[in-house]
Amino acid sequence: MEKLKSLIPEDLLQTVRSSSVDDLLSSSSSSLLRLFLGLPQFHRVVSELSDPGLGCCGKNEETSLDLKRRGNLCFRSHDFDDALRFYSKALRVAPPHAIDGDKSLLASLFLNRANVLHNLGLVEESLRDCHRALRIDPYYAKAWYRRGKLNTVLGNYKDASLDITVSMSLESSPVGLKQLQNELKAIPVNNKTSKNHDEYHPSSNAGVDYLPRVQSEVKLRCVSTKEKGRGMVSECDIEQASVIHVEEPFSVVISKNCRETHCHFCLNELPDDSVPCPSCSIPVYCSESCQIRSGGMLSTNKMDKHHNFQNLPDDIVEHITGVTSVDKYYSETESIQEHQHECRGANWSAVLPSDAVLAGRVIMKLINQGKATMDLSNLQEILELSHSYSEMSPESKLELHLLSIVLIWCLSKSCCPDLLICEASVTQTIILLSQIKVNSIAVVRMKSSGDSFQCIPSGNVSAKEPIQSLEQIRVGQAIYKSGSLFNHSCKPNIHLYFLSRGLVMRTTEFVPMGCPLELSYGPEVGKWDCKDRIRFLEEEYFFHCRCRGCSQINISDLVINGYCCVNTNCTGVVLDSKVATCESEKLNLFLAAPKSLDRHFQVSEKVYADVGEVASSLLTKPRGSFHIEPEICLKCGSRCDVEKSHVEVNKAWNHLRRVDELMNSGHANVSMLSDCLRSIAVLRTSLHVYNKDIADAEDKVAQACYLAGELRGAREHCEASIKILKRLYEDEHVVIGNEMVKLASIQLASGDSSAAWDTTKILSQIFSKYYGSHAQTLFCYLPCFKQEAVDYLIPRTS
Ligand SMILES: C[S@@+](CC[C@H](N)C(=O)[O-])C[C@H]1O[C@@H](n2cnc3c(N)ncnc32)[C@H](O)[C@@H]1O
């Protein structure tokens, strides 16, 4: 993009950077398009992106064969992990009809990987790979044999016998036949048959009816307000934790950092037997069903599958058909095919930013549905999404213009020749990209620290493992058409989470009839102070937040970055000038607003009591406008030297950051603890007792204590951190639940199962409020925690 930018003359750059939506249809986009179409440098750049012949994303037989050879070497030296890696890579680049010796390359790779998986003890995964090899090549005797062995291990004896029988029908050597006969004899007689191993897949649940139902009594309505545009409100009273909305995405794209680890369709983590796209080397899927719904050619076997099996008994032919048929994996109605147009080996979909790839998916979906015209002139009216083009920064506008020209060119040249490269299509794509900026939703997963979350056995603590904790991973970006009608609040009353690619929204509090239903786009009260939230939303979403969190007084915004009073007996807070200015503006707006406005979100008595504790001076409304004085305690009026405190706090953080580095490099030791405690003491003498910095520091010290085996200290500091977070958020906020995961694992490690049990009960309650019954499946350690605690509370009698 930088190359293209450098080709634009200064006056045109200025026109584009300062353009409004009305200007779009006039000069700026068409002048830029005209300029680029006449430049050979532009054609060079876009042909590198759109010409499949110049692309690196196609299949490559040589590379695949080389990777297979390396896999074989690793397999022979019993390095199964590396063998698995090489075979999976080889599968990704293997052309569907390539032959290696007398076998299909793909089929042999699947079978080799099945052997590795079997050696790694992954029997189900191994069976699925055999199945894949056989669907490509039904005459693959070794694959039938391996399948028979695996079915025997799994106790599917009837299938095992049939598999070995088919293998025998393909075996010509007398020695081989003898060996197979012996295998067959060794299989116990039983009628149990196996389940279909591709339909059964733990993570591949997208596409079936996996989303919960919205309660029938829940009724929502879309309303329009001057301040926030359209938004959703409740038409009835809604109980806490009710499912109010579920939706499949209109379009999704995987995050670049998850391309190697997550399924490109359902966005769940990839299993060890991942499935590649049959036509290009980019996507990988957790199962065939995800791959087929995502698009790409289907690598079916062109042979008459039953030609050689004609003389076999009916039950065996039926068995072969059952294993090798692909029909049951594919149904037209389920088809989504969002990757198909990218699947030509050209580079553009691997290189362009996610926003542009998502825009390409939206455009191609609407064209394939016959809804969008070939000049895309009706795109806006079909999508009905809001946008903030005019509020975007000059640089972002220029970026959108360039991206849309490049995207339209790539789509037209690589997969959709009927798509017109014209002023209308470019302008509509610019608007689509600006709609994606404000309407697309990040699809996230909660991941526990460490590769897999395992309970720490009671009384045990490993010197290297950090405390179990949760982090949020952004696995994709999606457009949910109805979901994008929900406005933002920094004090949201709904929580959003994902099951595969499906979105679920739940209320986190009782919502009375007529009340706006709002979720958080990222910033929340308790996470950042008001000025930081406002700045984030202006920079990322181009609007000035008008939510209840940013227009009403609350304790969190006052204390989160506050300093303590010089008077040690006073609980008041002292603000720096930036926070004081923001809070003054907020209070003046709130007091000036008509009382009828936002009546559902009136400040409660509890909020007044909380604010009174730290800033009672704010509760007596002055006659004129509010001016919160910085550096003056908002309770007793004492003056405080904020600058001096700021210097002390920075010094303390420098110490804590060094401790952090030691911990990250695995060099945690007991001596660093005294450093930590001194830093915490400095923070506590300078900052307000509820300042978030203290909570963060306490959390770090808990981690340091844990790594040094000081479990009592770890627990005390973790509890101190939670105590502050409860004042910044609220007692049952999901952030508190996440922190309690750490506390429970410290309690378990120190052998205090009774306390761990109590903590687990509270965190389960919090997660149920946010995730309902899905808490148990999304946070797989919840049952594990409970079991651990119960095991030690009720010792087994045996
Ligand atoms: C995803 S859309 C929400 C639906 C949108 N109001 C509409 O009319 O389609 C996001 C846009 O809604 C508006 N919005 C959402 N939350 C807001 C808030 N708290 N304060 C002001 N505007 C808000 C902003 O214009 C923002 O760009």
Image (cartoon, grey):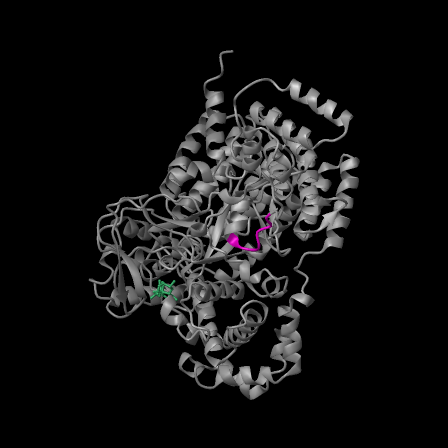
At which x and y percent is residue 198?
54, 39
Q: Quick check: 705 above or below 190?
A: below
Q: Quick check: 346 above or below 502?
A: below
At which x and y percent is residue 367?
45, 66
Q: Is residue 45 visible?
A: yes
First to last magenta residue range = 294-300
Q: Quick check: 415 above or below 648?
A: below
Out of 112 and 538, give the one closest to the viewer: 112
Out of 220 and 511, give the one closest to the viewer: 220
Q: Quadrant of the N terminus?
A: bottom right
Out of 260 and 128, give the one closest to the viewer: 128
- Residue lying farthest bottom? 11
Apparent side of residue 184 relative to residue 415 in the rendered image (left or right): right
Apparent side of residue 225 relative to residue 89 in the rendered image (left or right): left
Apparent side of residue 266 relative to residue 621 in the rendered image (left or right): right
Out of 205 and 656, give the one closest to the viewer: 205
At which x and y percent is residue 761?
40, 32
- Residue lying farthest top? 798
